[in-house]
Amino acid sequence: MSATQPLTPAVGALINHIDLSLPLSTKDKAFIEEALLNHKVVFFRNQNISPQQQVDFASNFGNLHIHPIYPHVPNHPELIVLDTQLNDLRDNALWHSDVSFSKNPPYGAVLQAKKVPEYGGDTFWSNVEKAYDELSPALQSFLETLTATHDFSKSFPTSRFGETDENLDKLERTKRENPSITHPVIRTIPETGKKVLYVNEGFTTRINELSEKESQLLLDYLFQHITKPEFTIRWHWQAGDIAFWDNRTTQHYAVYDYDKSVHRIMNRATILK
């Protein structure tokens, strides 16, 4: 029988007794969705599943996004490869919500640890629903009147992702296809009616209704507020671990504290609604 073990008061739970290599039952799908709403990110241990099985599992929850920049698992364009021997992964070493530069940002993501360091390379998640709840009512009301710009280029600069002609062409095409987009600073989760902070260090460039200086001051405060320890969990990876997070109610930070010679491989499926 499926069981959930909460890991912190704010965010994160371990789910036991579900084998992700098998087709997901309707009951287990509903169980996982409920756990996500309650805990924002859920973890599964000892799930050494194939790329196709990861795609099949993630597809239970929505259509899968194909990332325009990151390399993919061969024959599986829906699976991003985050490999220290293929990518410079420093762009993940900041707090962010995946693909917030798009008009319809992803619902969630399923990340599998294929090869991990003996130590280091942990990932943090923060509960941005709780971060909103802990703001004063006056600031909550003010933020609900604001919108913010999210820009692909903030985390994908030409200096790091346009080193070759091929990469530069891909980068420029992606910029054209993904112009900067405006989202509310506060979003509401349809299933719960709960509100969340929706600005992130990775892609948010300014608050539109404020002056540039005011915008930066407020963003700096919100970015710092989101990372308070009481809102977060730090996960130490083991090979075969899978994390499934609600991309609407969390932000995450991949700690880049290991030597460049260390080989770390993670595969991610990103889920649209």
Image (spheres, rainbow, N blue to C red):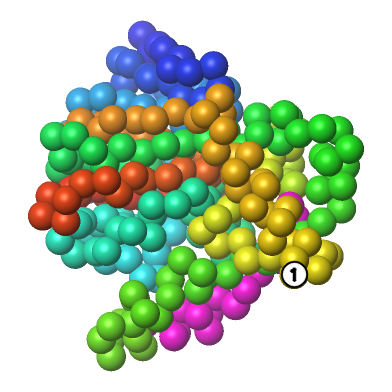
The image quadrant of residue 67 is bottom left
- The percent coordinates of residue 267 (x first, y second) are 27, 49
Foreground: 138 or 145? 138
* Residue 214 within the segment the image draws in magenta: no
Residue farthest toward the top in the current orientation of the protein? 1
Q: Left or right: 196 with respect to 94? A: right
Residue 26: where, in percent of width, then height? 45, 26
- Is residue 36 visible in the rendered image? The answer is no
**Residue on which the image places disc 1:** 212
Residue 255 picture location, percent across and down: 34, 44
What is the secondary structure assignment of the residue under circle 1? helix
Residue drawn at x 60%, y 40% is 226
Instruction: Look at the image and give the residue range highlighted in magenta.
Output: 170-185
- Crowd tier of the residue under label 1, counting other residues whose Cα lies within 10 Å: few below 14, some 14–19, many 20 or above: few
Q: Split into 4 quadrants, where in the image is the N terminus? A: top left
Residue 173 within the segment the image draws in magenta: yes
Camera-side residue of 47 and 99: 99
Residue 176 shown left or right of residue 270 in the figure: right
Type of amino acid at the residue the image marks with label 1: Glu
Residue found at x 44% / y 84%: 173
Residue at image location 31% in from the left, 21% down from the top: 18
